Image: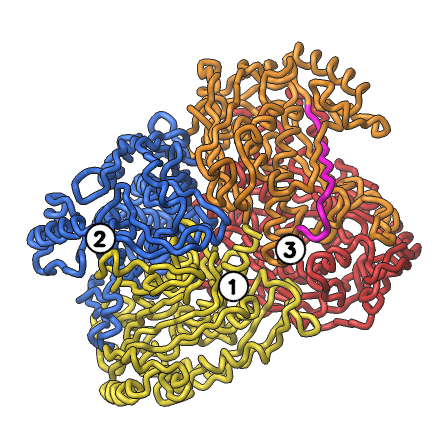
Chain colours: A yellow, B blue, C red, D orange
Amino acid sequence: MSFNTFGRLLRFTTWGESHGPAIGAIVDGCPPGLALSEADIQPWLDKRRPGASRFTTQRREADQVRILSGTFEGRTTGTPISLLIDNQDQRSKDYSDVAKAYRPGHADYTYDAKYGFRDWRGGGRSSARETAARVAASAVARLIIPEVKIRAYLVELGGDPVDRNRIDLDAIDANALNCPDTAAAERWEAALDAARKAGSSLGAVVECVTDGVPAGWGAPVYAKLDSELAAAMMSINAAKGVEIGDGFAAARLRGEENADAMRAGPTFLSNHAGGILGGISSGQPVVVRVAFKPTSSILTPVPTISRDGAETEIVTKGRHDPCVGIRAVPVVEAMMALVLADQKLLHRGQCG
Amino acid sequence: MSFNTFGRLLRFTTWGESHGPAIGAIVDGCPPGLALSEADIQPWLDKRRPGASRFTTQRREADQVRILSGTFEGRTTGTPISLLIDNQDQRSKDYSDVAKAYRPGHADYTYDAKYGFRDWRGGGRSSARETAARVAASAVARLIIPEVKIRAYLVELGGDPVDRNRIDLDAIDANALNCPDTAAAERWEAALDAARKAGSSLGAVVECVTDGVPAGWGAPVYAKLDSELAAAMMSINAAKGVEIGDGFAAARLRGEENADAMRAGPTFLSNHAGGILGGISSGQPVVVRVAFKPTSSILTPVPTISRDGAETEIVTKGRHDPCVGIRAVPVVEAMMALVLADQKLLHRGQCG
Amino acid sequence: MSFNTFGRLLRFTTWGESHGPAIGAIVDGCPPGLALSEADIQPWLDKRRPGASRFTTQRREADQVRILSGTFEGRTTGTPISLLIDNQDQRSKDYSDVAKAYRPGHADYTYDAKYGFRDWRGGGRSSARETAARVAASAVARLIIPEVKIRAYLVELGGDPVDRNRIDLDAIDANALNCPDTAAAERWEAALDAARKAGSSLGAVVECVTDGVPAGWGAPVYAKLDSELAAAMMSINAAKGVEIGDGFAAARLRGEENADAMRAGPTFLSNHAGGILGGISSGQPVVVRVAFKPTSSILTPVPTISRDGAETEIVTKGRHDPCVGIRAVPVVEAMMALVLADQKLLHRGQCG
Amino acid sequence: MSFNTFGRLLRFTTWGESHGPAIGAIVDGCPPGLALSEADIQPWLDKRRPGASRFTTQRREADQVRILSGTFEGRTTGTPISLLIDNQDQRSKDYSDVAKAYRPGHADYTYDAKYGFRDWRGGGRSSARETAARVAASAVARLIIPEVKIRAYLVELGGDPVDRNRIDLDAIDANALNCPDTAAAERWEAALDAARKAGSSLGAVVECVTDGVPAGWGAPVYAKLDSELAAAMMSINAAKGVEIGDGFAAARLRGEENADAMRAGPTFLSNHAGGILGGISSGQPVVVRVAFKPTSSILTPVPTISRDGAETEIVTKGRHDPCVGIRAVPVVEAMMALVLADQKLLHRGQCG
């Protein structure tokens, strides 16, 4: 794996900056003969697209994807699939302050420290805009795993969790927040409006539940399915934590509570494990949760320093999501699809 | 990366089963000229060694490491370093029940599902014994990053957290639980004794704080330092969650609370980020926490099925840690060292 | 490494088909701060561009490269560099026969055997057009190794070798055949004209001599510099053989003839080894030769079969190079640059 | 891939020095359930073992392999297979001269240049002894490709080729030189005896013909089967050239001569391509030839320099093969098996 490539047999490489001419992804290793056109990719990009509600950045991007290679007469050929999305709404002038001082919570300082300078327009390569390329790539991955159904949603926003008894997956698309609990969605809207008006931002926790993964995907020891998922999810902008199944709560259970008893079938009487045992899928739903910090781009002034080390304050104007977790939902789904498709091919390669 | 290999420039491959003749690691890509002998590795293995107290498995292993290649006249040559540890106390008879039925929480069922059969002696490749090989490999990694100081310890056991105001790193080695809070250590000992007598087990959370990492290690986008650490930590047996800095708690902060303000130096006024911004180290301490589920091997009977699908119960006799989190501490440190050493070399390779 | 990615620290991924809308390369892992614009890349593409003489395909391609990412204010940022070249002259109608029957010597049959179908327009992914993407990528690699001077040329065409006493590197650009021996160039022109008129084609041997590689690049055992070069060169279309230094002729020498004696400096009294000992550069010129088979696309009818197995004959019309070795010269140089730049970074990563 | 690891899905990592305590290989990614014991590996090692005749080094090594992991009840488990071979006959005293001065043709100077120092005992990591680990690993690979039959032999020794009309594969094992032409074997024995008496050595060309590879293994563009084979073969000690099918001779053919015409079946009327078209196997025999330089360790004095740069002469005493090509035969076969097994798994992974 390289810096901007993810995967083993199904590999994707993304490129592009927030304010460059375009972004894109190369998907390599895809099986041949799968039906693929732009129409298979666009809906996933539309789910992630900015500007859909007042709770996401007002940047306007059509996010129209073009397939430049790897298909012939509407089917994948087995050769690399090049996906390209033009950037349209790059108002670089918004970022003039960013050129001079480091935005706390952003990668400004660390990119400078590593590379000696940086593309300061909209965060450059560290912008969440990169995730559009992943979402595009994931549409290819989904073709490989038609047996799998992936669904992600927010289970907590600004510290306010959903009521687990009220989770209704059909409710997710009925609000602008990817919230499966209608009552929580109302509370969250109010909290977000208040945070936005206050020049602040909120964090969130995304949960992803995946049905249809058969037992046997994943591998010991450093290619464990949970290890791959942890890497995949932690690579998403603003992610600060990943847990599988009960996760941190499992550390508070006793052995007999945590053990998922088995019955004939096989079936399991519970799923504390989140569908993964010893790094290999068990046939139960694969459950992952990802914690996203509050958006670092806020209107509240924060003490910082300039490139030459002078102390100053910074206010991040521009157009930003008040809670990056909301638009992270399709990205979490994308990474899940990309990891699982890769694991399916790896398993087939080794075990036939 | 392959199934049993971790790393990019500094790579290590581990091999071996719990009850085979030996286990080992190959460390490849190590810089030449570093002083290395068995005496540099053994202390780290001794920290992880079983049988040191009543709170860890009573399996007796000397865990004596031998260097079989890669050094000459006491220094690394730049060629692969082969480390071998003989297994000594393999009482396979203890595991006869395991051959017949799946232990819930273990990898028994999933290995069978993946591979069609499994080495059932002590968990085979899925045994935590594999982590001894990582600890041995990490001693080599530490030679590459002398500027870095790594310290891990338990911050929660059985749902009982340490008092953050009472954390004293000097206290860690004064108890058998890797606990930095003397008062908590006493409570935990009682809880562990009770759990053990009840045929149960407890979970734990390990925290690892690393000083001395300069700004600039790590890389966008899929080689982010936090992404690598997440993969590394989640690959440890029984790990169910990983968080960086404030982690899941960051999802409950507001933007202005979470932003680590900067002052001249540069210094930071806080470290919610855990020393990583945009996937690259910031020069602050790198902070990671890992959640470990309670030991799945318990004396309490759990419903399960046999290999041929018949319903039964299983009690896991044998010798087991009542809380795997305790002995995970040196393993978390090992993975931190291995990731950081690799990142240092990668950074030097790309950026000079 | 993946199917369409080459390299370890400096990695490039190419994509695109002969008759798709575009081709391209992503170069990842490039050091930051290097001056790079399209003007640094275009001259190398122009050297490879078709249609320059009657001895190369008459396909007309401007081969204008665009940099879509990875630079800012004219310098590399350390993030992936996306290079795109639009295809312009794709006369797919020329290839209608190819859709029906397999061209002997081409990848038609094997792609069908592997993938179940293929993009038959101009060879699709197996077209030598892919090498334009490599040449573009190599311009980035050359920035990393300014100390290295690479020069390739033909030493044999149609079985007629140059006179080694008459090799003059300044002569190479004075003819259309990349020939360093003016007398040989005249003979070759006549041979090529005759072959073209006869509906035939000729093979060639390309030699590449590289000055300025310091001692110490490369690594045992499976990353030997000669092993990497062999893989790189053999991946070029129509390549059938690779040799280092004296190559196959070394197998006919006696030990004392083949040994390159050393004198103070160090200097070497000969260079049978081609600048590589034990897989590591010795500081002498790195010398590689690559054999290219005659172009498989010929006007002479060849017996073959159709997709459904019926026996037939095929004549490959279209526009083709009568000797692919001529235009392979800049591609050999490109692969040399890409391998060496990667090795330089790898060496710096491991050995500082 | 790392420095000492080869392969993608089936990967092997070798370690060990000529005069260390042992050498070994880890084979990772092997399919589960294959019958494997030491008895499956030993015969291949015995074919390579030194000391079998007066034409190979008189070093005495039993080369007894032990399987330390990855099997259970005689079958592979899918986890890493650790193979270990103890070194027995390490007369380090023979190499005292080597510590002081560089042996021309060897890796002595380049290892020093790269790493700052080296293990000078018997060439350390650069010794051909490393190839025993590959041969051991290849026995595992062979289990994965039972449909494939690999046979290698010498076709040229000291510049004296076999008579292609006299090649008889049954003759190979009837002489000590891996020669398929009985008459040539007699001439070669005389030539070798003369060279040895003269303190000299001879080079050789090994040919490897592989039957049973189905059409469809390999992949564009940088994982071409011929590219993988070139890397694999060039990584063998003393290899200086690799060619596929007609190789360098193909560069002297005309297009219509070189094209392998197809007839129904499909069958091919010739095999100039060596069984590979566009980097993918065609179903014909895969044919590779590898050129080996004469042994660099000779009794004839050669001018060289000492570590501190002073001019001197060196005579390489010790025990050496007068022609390394002879014992390279099983190593060429090993690398062929390792590449093909990997490609089979890769193909299955991507294409099902």
| Disc ID at residue A341 | 1
Report the Cα–Cα distance between label 1 and label 3.
22 Å
Q: Please, what is the three-letter code of the amino acid marked with disc 3?
A: Val
Q: In the displayed structure, would residue A291 be above or below residue A254?
A: below
In the picture of the structure, the residue carrying the numbered disc 3 is D221
Residue in front for this viewpoint, B319 or D308: B319
Classify residue A36 by image quadrant.
bottom right
User: Can residue D205 be found in the magenta stretch?
Assistant: yes
Classify residue A109 by image quadrant.
bottom left
- Outermost residue, right side: C198
Q: Residue at x 41, y 67 (%)?
A: A285
**Kind of element beneath mark 1:** helix
Report the span colored magenta.
D203-217
Q: From the top left corner, tell me how far across and down residue D48 is, in percent.
A: 60, 25
Residue in front for this viewpoint, B321 or C113: B321
**Which mark is in front, 1 or 3?**
1
Q: Chain of mark 3?
A: D
Do the CB atoms of the residues marked 2 and 3 lie less than 8 Å apart?
no
**Kind of element beneath mark 3:** loop
Residue C138, visible in the rendered structure: no
Pointer 3 local density, CA inside 10 Å: few below 14, some 14–19, many at least 20 = many
Q: Chain of mark 2?
A: B
Asked if both marks, 1 and 3, belong to the same chain, the answer given is no
Q: Residue at x 68, y 14 (%)?
A: D195
| Disc ID at residue B201 | 2
**Which mark is in front, 1 or 2?**
2
User: Can residue B201 be found in the magenta stretch?
Assistant: no
Q: Please, what is the three-letter code of the amino acid marked with disc 2?
A: Ser
Report the Cα–Cα distance between label 2 and label 3.
53 Å
Q: Please, what is the three-letter code of the amino acid marked with disc 1?
A: Ala
**Kind of element beneath mark 2:** loop
Residue in front for this viewpoint, A24 or D113: A24
